[in-house]
Image (spheres, grey):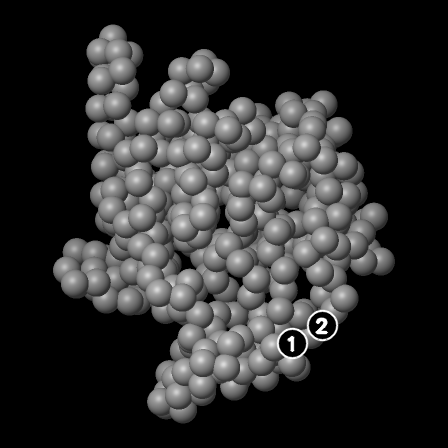
Amino acid sequence: MRWFGPSDPVTLRDIRQAGASEVVTALHEIPNGEIWPHAAIAARKRTIEAAGLGWTVVESLPVVDAIKIRGPEWDEAIARYRESLVNLAANGIFTVTYNFMPVLDWTRTDLAWELPDGALALRFEIEAAAAYDLHILRRPNAERDYSPALIERAARRFHALDDAGRTRLERTIIAGLPGSEETFTTERFRDALAQYDGIDADALRAHHVAFLEAVCPLADELGIRLVVHPDDPPFALFGLPRVVSTEDDVASLFRRVPNPSNGLCFCAGSFGARADNDLPGMIERLGTRIGFLHLRSVQREREGAFHEAAHLEGDAGMTAIVAAIHRLQQRENRRIPMRPDHGHQMLDDLSKQTLPGYSLLGRMRGLAELRGLERGIAYASDPAIAA
């Protein structure tokens, strides 16, 4: 399970009792782009191991915008990133997750969307995002990115919101979700977007390749696998390109930077928000590059909207996904670290202060379902494996 450090309302004791064997975490207290010191990594690892858990997967070591735009501070930012990798490897941590999403990390427009059973889920809706973009952010030329029908619906949506609703929408989009790399005010968000003026999808892909060419040779030497997390949601937002959204995106990245350390965090929810991504087929074709798994499912709605489904429900087809993972692990004789992701807020957690998407009980339900599904598939393949 993911753990956000000592301030996380979900404790290491909770995570161990939920059935996890390790945590996936990061040094969230260190500002983005700064070096992760050897001593701080070692201290965090001791804390985790004292609770009976392991830590071998980082999520995430942020790639700052200075790297993504290839700005004047690129050399210094790359040097700091490389030093953090050295310090992680020295502490026995060899899987490092990162993303290449410009400015914003994962994005939602509703953090407490009520499901028919009363549980709460995360949701993304393009109409709400457009209402923020056009009427709160007021991004220059934003109307070019939306159809006339969507512009009209977004205007109605905005004008139907009271002041509290408008503030809630703004904070949901830009104030920072758990694990996200930045928090913004609307003014700072406008400034951050302006850094990307003139950077289209091709330029961002070139900058991504340049980053990997700068760090992968060192990662190869250290035995680290860098695993890129796909875009969430997997399409352009607020005029910013997103270039890790499809199988073609990642396959091209692996062709251009073939180093063994260049890998993939396969997030079934992020890729699954697009109906044109064949999730089991992607695991079969990209399997050697997959170094980390986020197993979650989304329910796709109309016009790009989606919400987090229960782990074995929604549009992911989790049984086929886990079966493909089992075949991959058997074929390559390795075990791939996995975590459940974005559980529903449910049961007693409905009355608690929780991190959106990272309450305990919804993720514990997902972990239990996924472990049972994996064990059943393994037994059906070979009863001796699951014994």
Tell me the distance, in whole angstroms, between the alpha carbons under discs 1 and 2. 6 Å
On the image, the x and y values in percent for residue 334 come to 46, 18
Q: Is residue 179 above or below residue 159?
A: above
Instruction: Name the residue that disc number 1 marks.
Output: 190
Relative to 257, is 6 on the left or the right? left
Relative to 10, is 26 on the left or the right? right
Pick the front one: 6 or 184 = 184
User: Which amino acid type corresponds to the residue marked 2 in the rendered image?
Assistant: Ala
On the image, the x and y values in percent for residue 211 come to 74, 43
Relative to 364, is 356 on the left or the right? right
User: Which amino acid type corresponds to the residue marked 1 in the rendered image?
Assistant: Arg
Instruction: Name the residue that disc number 2 marks.
Output: 194
Is the Cβ of the residue at disc 1 closer than 8 Å to that at disc 2? yes
Q: Is residue 152 above or below residue 169?
A: below
Element marked by disc 1: helix
Q: Residue at x 68, y 32 (%)?
A: 255
- Examine the rendering and report whether any part of residue 50 can be seen: no
- Picture quadrant where residue 12 is located: top left
Q: Residue at x 54, y 41 (%)?
A: 247
- Examine the rendering and report whether any part of residue 71 can be seen: yes
Q: Is residue 166 above or below residue 240?
A: below
Q: Residue at x 62, y 73 (%)?
A: 189
On the image, the x and y values in percent for residue 227 come to 57, 37
Relative to 261, is 377 on the left or the right? left
